[in-house]
Amino acid sequence: MAAIAARWSSPARLHPLTRRRLRFSASFSSAMAVPASAGFGWADALRVAGDVGRGDESDLSGYFRKVQICNRGMCANLIPYGITAFKNGTGLLMDGGERCWWRFVEHLRDFHDVFTIVSGNNGSNTVENVSLHSSLRTPEDRTHAIGDVIKSLGEMIPGIRNELYPVTSSYGMPSYFSLERAAAPYFGIKAYGVHMNGYVEKDGQKYLWIGKRSDSKQTYPGMLDHLVAGGLPYGISCKENIIKECEEEAGIPRSVSTNAISVGAISYMDIEGFRYKRDVLFCYDLKLPDDFVPNNEDGEVDSFKLIPVAHAANIIQRTDFFKPNCNLVIIDFLFRHGYINPDCHGYLDLLEGLRSGDCS
Amino acid sequence: MAAIAARWSSPARLHPLTRRRLRFSASFSSAMAVPASAGFGWADALRVAGDVGRGDESDLSGYFRKVQICNRGMCANLIPYGITAFKNGTGLLMDGGERCWWRFVEHLRDFHDVFTIVSGNNGSNTVENVSLHSSLRTPEDRTHAIGDVIKSLGEMIPGIRNELYPVTSSYGMPSYFSLERAAAPYFGIKAYGVHMNGYVEKDGQKYLWIGKRSDSKQTYPGMLDHLVAGGLPYGISCKENIIKECEEEAGIPRSVSTNAISVGAISYMDIEGFRYKRDVLFCYDLKLPDDFVPNNEDGEVDSFKLIPVAHAANIIQRTDFFKPNCNLVIIDFLFRHGYINPDCHGYLDLLEGLRSGDCS
């Protein structure tokens, strides 16, 4: 039980650098730039993309803002109101501050058979300790009980996908239980995904394939996206998942997608409303043949464009057109392919910022 | 003055993950595997290199050991005896524990005009606070005063190179003063370097150019090395430095070396004897023409070999033939080029381990 509670937050892993990094730019924005409807078209994106040479190429501030957007609530003055400590291996210790996310726990109080919530005081704040009820002894028990809670909460957790995510201490470790994908951030549970940049090299210049999400997509409709990305459900390896997503999202046959290479990972921790999103994204690169044209097969992508990497960088720096976490994966690509160089002020801070979350 | 003292260690940047990471392998070795004389030849290295398929390819333990070797003294039970906190912006706070590195400070006590050392107690340990003397107001004053101290210490700091390193809060920030390169780790001052993997791609397979250091080299004689690497002295950009080192170390003309791309950075913190080494290495990749053959021009390299990347990985996993920090830069290469994949147990821990030090 203690171990399960620990999954909800392992405060020892809160990255101390996060505070410093997020202070880098004075213009921290507390509002996430995610319009309900994207409100832009390819023409708008391409206009910004090609507008090269107007800004200072060594100015990384646009990238820093994208890191901040994925790490809201992590700036110095908010941390004391978030998760503070993990106590005696018995559960999750939080204060009773003003954070919206923490107030979600109020909605769990009625489920006496599922959660044990103990209030106390840490000297300066009211603290509460949440753990799963000791009667839930097996992963199946827990999965079933939490599943029932999620059903009971109804519209409080929108966007149910009927897709189970494993709850583990870190990637590859045994699963304590599973829960609905859409519910993971409400319980502060870490989720894993695979994100792939598909690129082409012509005459020594690199181009990225960029997707525009369908306007009817439930999340981030109409926004720009990678060629391929997806969550990592229970029981499938990263490699198999990326191959599956390549097929579904971009019509890339296995003979090509098997050449996708893993290149690292990014992570972030974001608090918004009742959601505490803790994601780790495994990043992949796939170098595609010059003449390859992606073809979406699951209706989730409206269209694709192939644009020079420097143009994609422009869009990231100057707009909020990309789905927020895609920015980070593309910034990682820019680092690895030499588009951001050490002589730019803030290089190392930005590099560290790409793994602001618990990356385990 | 306070700011200068802070440079000697910014404890807020001590990475909390380090403890967990270094606990990953139970077989932590406290002895650095750096023989005075390398004691192996190319034939030995190539024998291990080509011995593919004997080990478990998904076993990353050999890589973890290399991370540990560069981060001695950072395991859980030693951290309390290292640097503990930075107090009130007035200087560097340490305990008076058993760490050899800390005992170096004893040798600074006689320099009353240069250092201010204040003893105290933090409740459970004796602590000492070291800062530069307030009379040293300009960078030039400090450089001169510390330079004199280093001269006075004589053989205590061996390997003087007559190469000045800037002391900054983080990369690219103004220099507080400069000091002799060989002395940086004795004062716990962070140093920066550039390391480059030179590779060739033939028939879809990648090969790394590996150097064997000259037997007469002062540091790590006879050990394996990258194609090109060097410290980052005062007043030169990373890009210019890598171009200069390419020319000197491998005879790579500017027309080729200008294609080297920056790909990220690694960092480590290592305590050995009186030295507390805090390095940040900017990593570069250079894809070379198939027919290129490196040619050392400064006498520091005995010879070069081109070997398949998987063979270099074998050498890292199974031997201590590489200069220790080169292992980390090559492991970073293995990550970025897909030779280590997320389905290997410990993938994320190892990835984080490559930046165990203060990477700023």
Image: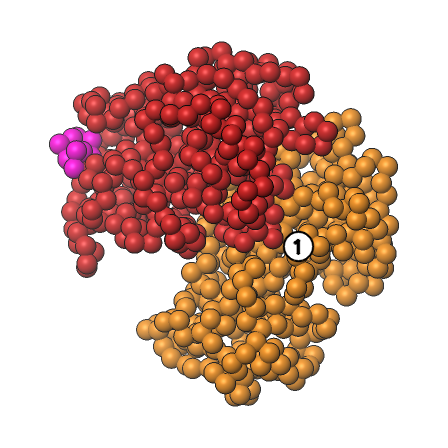
Chain colours: A red, B orange
Residue in front for this viewpoint, A92 or A207: A207
Residue A79 place in picture, x, y as percent? 31, 51
Q: Quadrant of residue A144?
A: top left
Assess whether residue A107 is covered by the magenta stretch. yes
The residue at the point 48 percent across, 73 percent down is B5
Q: Secondary structure at mark 1?
A: helix
Bounds of the magenta segment: A106-116
Residue drawn at the location 58% of the way across and 81% of the way down: B141
Q: Does the stretch in magenta take in A71? A: no
Furthest toward the left, the residue is A110
Foreground pick, B101 / A333:
A333
* Kind of residue at disc 1: Cys
The residue to which callout 1 is attached is B238
Q: Is residue A155 above or below residue B289?
A: above
Of residue B349 and residue B47, the one placed in the foreground of this image is: B349
**Quadrant of the rendered image containing residue A129:** top left
Q: Residue at x 18, y 33 (%)?
A: A108
Whole-percent x, y for residue A332 in the image: 54, 39
Give how far across and how far down residue B180 sits, in percent: 66, 72
Q: Position of residue B46 (x, y in %)?
A: 80, 42
Is B62 positioned to the left or the right of B169 in the image? Answer: right
